[in-house]
Amino acid sequence: QQQVKQSPQSLIVQKGGISIINCAYENTAFDYFPWYQQFPGKGPALLIAIRPDVSEKKEGRFTISFNKSAKQFSLHIMDSQPGDSATYFCAASKDNDMRFGAGTRLTVKP
Amino acid sequence: NAGVMQNPRHLVRRRGQEARLRCSPMKGHSHVYWYRQLPEEGLKFMVYLQKENIIDESGMPKERFSAEFPKEGPSILRIQQVVRGDSAAYFCASSRSQETQYFGPGTRLLVL
C-alpha cells in the first residue's frame, strides 16, 4: 500500500530554471512532511520540512507548498543549479511512522 | 557532534552467510529506524526500535531478518543465510523525538 505518491520519477531542468516535485498522501493523520535530498552513494539528508498548519515554507531557494484539503505538497527549487542534481524524496509522518515517496531524480543541466 | 554512523560501509557476503550491520545513532537520540533501498528505488521501512525495545517491525521480512538496539552499544540489523535478493543499501536513521529522522551513510550489501 503506497501511502505517499511522488511525481515525476525523473526531471531535467536547465540551470536557472524552477524544479517542481509533487507528492500526494492518503492518511489524513500525517502531521509532518519533510523532504530529503540524496546524492549518489550517500544517505538521505533532511532538506526542509513543513507542518500542515502553514501553507508554505521557504528556506533559501527551496520552498514547500502545502495543500491540506487536497492532501498534496510540493517542493520548488528556484534558480536550480547543477549542484542540486540529486534524488529527492518526500515523506509524511505521524509520530514515528514515516512513509517515503518513491523519489525523483533531478538533473540540472548547465 | 557526530552524525549517525554506520559500519561497515560496504559488505560482501556469499549466499548462506550472515550479515551484521551496525548503526550508532546521533548523541542523545534514542529512536532508531532501519530502511532498505534497492537501486533506483525509494526507501522501504523495515523496523523501528527504542532502547532495548522493538516498537514496529511491520516492514521486516518474517524470516532471516532480526534487529536489536541494546542498552549499550549500537543497533544491529542481522540477516541470516543471505540470498542475492538481499543485496541493497541499508540505511539507519535516528531521532530524538517522534519527528525528524537523520540518516547515516548506509551499508551497501552485496551478496555473491
Image (tube, grey):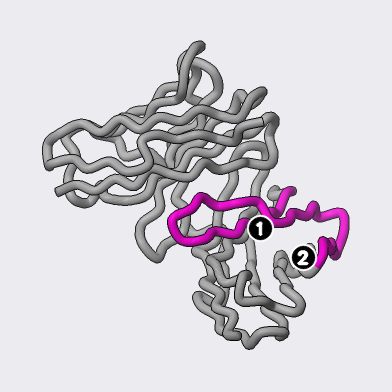
Callout 1 environment at 10 Å: few (<14), some (14 to 19), or many (20+)? many
* Mark 2 chain: A
Q: Choose between A71 and B109: the one closer to the eye.
A: B109
Q: Residue at x 51, y 33 (%)?
A: B48
Q: Is residue A41 magenta?
A: yes
Position of residue A19 relative to residue B17, above or below, is below
Please state the horizontal and vertical placement of residue A105, each as a whole percent of the image: 51, 72
Please state the horizontal and vertical placement of residue B71, each as a whole percent of the image: 51, 12
Q: Is residue A55 magenta?
A: yes
Q: Choose between A20 and B56: the one closer to the eye.
A: A20
Position of residue A32 relative to residue B99, above or below, is below
For badge 1, the amino acid type reads Trp
Q: Give the image quarter of residue B31.
A: top right
Q: Residue at x 25, y 33 (%)?
A: B19
Report helix, strand or loop for mark 1.
strand
Tell me where the magenta segment starts and ends, as one range.
Answer: A32-60
* Mark 1 chain: A
Residue identified by numbered label 2: A64
Residue identified by numbered label 1: A35
Q: Residue at x 87, y 54 (%)?
A: A53
Quadrant where the C terminus of chain A lies?
bottom right
Report helix, strand or loop for mark 2.
strand
For badge 2, the amino acid type reads Ile
Please state the horizontal and vertical placement of residue A95, each as a whole percent of the image: 67, 37
Real-space CA distance between mark 2 and mark 1, rounded to the nearest whole angstrom: 9 Å
Callout 2 environment at 10 Å: few (<14), some (14 to 19), or many (20+)? many
Position of residue B56 relative to residue B40, above or below, is above
Q: Contact, CB < 8 Å: mark 2 with mark 1?
A: yes
Q: Horizontally, is B98 left or right of B35 in the view? A: right
